[in-house]
Image: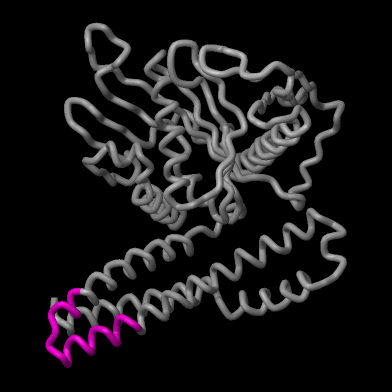
Amino acid sequence: MTAADLLNELAALEKTLSSIDAVLDPAAKREEIAKLSVAVAAPDLWDDQDHAQQVTSKLSRLQAEVDRLDALHTRVDDIQVLTELAEEANDPDTLAEAGRELKSLSDDIGALEIRTLLSGEYDERDALVTVRSEAGGVDAADWASMVLRMYLRWAERHGYATEVYDVSYAEEAGIKSATFVVKEPYAYGMLSVEQGTHRLIRISPFDNQGRRQTSFAGVDVLPVTEETDHIDIPESDIRVDVFRSSGPGGQSVNTTDSAVRITHLPTGLVVSCQNEKSQLQNKIAAMSVLQSRLLEKARAEKEAELRGLLSDGNSWGSQIRNYVLHPFQMVKDVRTGFEVGNAEAVLNGEIDNFIDAGIRWRRQQGER
């Protein structure tokens, strides 16, 4: 690639970055940062700890977004200077370095461009994810544990904080279900496109005859509730049961009844949490999960009413992706058509391209 080619690509990226600026509006964010900085300096800020955490968290998030945009603009300038120096000095090594930097910049701008497509009501929030085994017996339970690991590895790769609230282990192998939260701005917007049924085709490790097995895992993604949602749950509407936390095979992992199961009597929704150390912590986490599910139920009912539909608007039962491990390796999204041949990498958390394609596909569906 010549210096002229690099500069042309850089100009195109700079144009894309300007479009991103128009959507994210860093000037408005700087004004809000200034106001939040004054609030953070107030001596009585921590009198209300919940409010203080909201203020400091929002300030940190906005500052990180502005810093990210500023860094991308700086990299555009640096690559331009590097390319021009390479051209003047007729230095192929420096030109190659500029090309590598340009590729990295293109990837980072592309990732940020995806963020501009996340404009849903709850897209900015943390994500509450539940993985369940579906059809396929022990293979499905094992597959559900693989899907859980895939998402936790994805979050780990990006440095996103996660917390597992509850795991229900299957008797022979794998899990019946697991619920965890991803604590990262826009986690819900990103992971919401992962909701649906994930289908695995492989030689079953649990079949003595080595036959090929198809199994299914369901993924449910909800936004984490906030105080502004006003999801009030009267104590009279819930039944709270306590039990001992259990591990694989039903083995008890502690000697106290610290795990909590909450049943919402009006709807029949049941949630549980057993991974916190105390009964109180488990109840708080379980209530948070219940609030998120009630919020989604209300949203789905409202959407169904507006559209004149009888369904709840959920994606359960809709197959979104096939994972083939035999007779060849391939992972393909049935909605977007995006596919890769390295299934192992995908199962190790390399799912960004699937998420990006899903977000673009969802936007296209909304524009039709």
Query: Quick check: is 88 in the magenta stretch?
Result: yes
Residue lying furthest bottom in this view?
88
Residue 22 spot, x, y in % from top left: 50, 76
Point 87% across, 26% down: residue: 236
Left or right of 238? Residue 24 is: left
Residue 35 image position (x, y, % from top left): 73, 76
Q: Looking at the picture, tell me which residue is in the foreground, 367 or 289.
A: 289
Quadrant for residue 93, please give it. Answer: bottom left
Magenta stretch prevailing secondary structure = helix
Q: Is residue 346 visible?
A: yes
Give above or below for 282 relative to 76: above
How many numbered callouts?
0
Q: Is 148 above or below relative to 121?
A: above
What is the quadrant of the C terminus in the image?
Answer: bottom left
Q: Is residue 361 left or right of residue 201?
A: right
**Residue located 61% across and 52% down the image:** 125
Residue at point 33%, 75% (across, down):
13
Q: Look at the image and give the residue range highlighted in magenta.
A: 78-96
- Residue 12 in the magenta stretch? The answer is no
Residue 14 drawn at (x, y percent): 36, 79
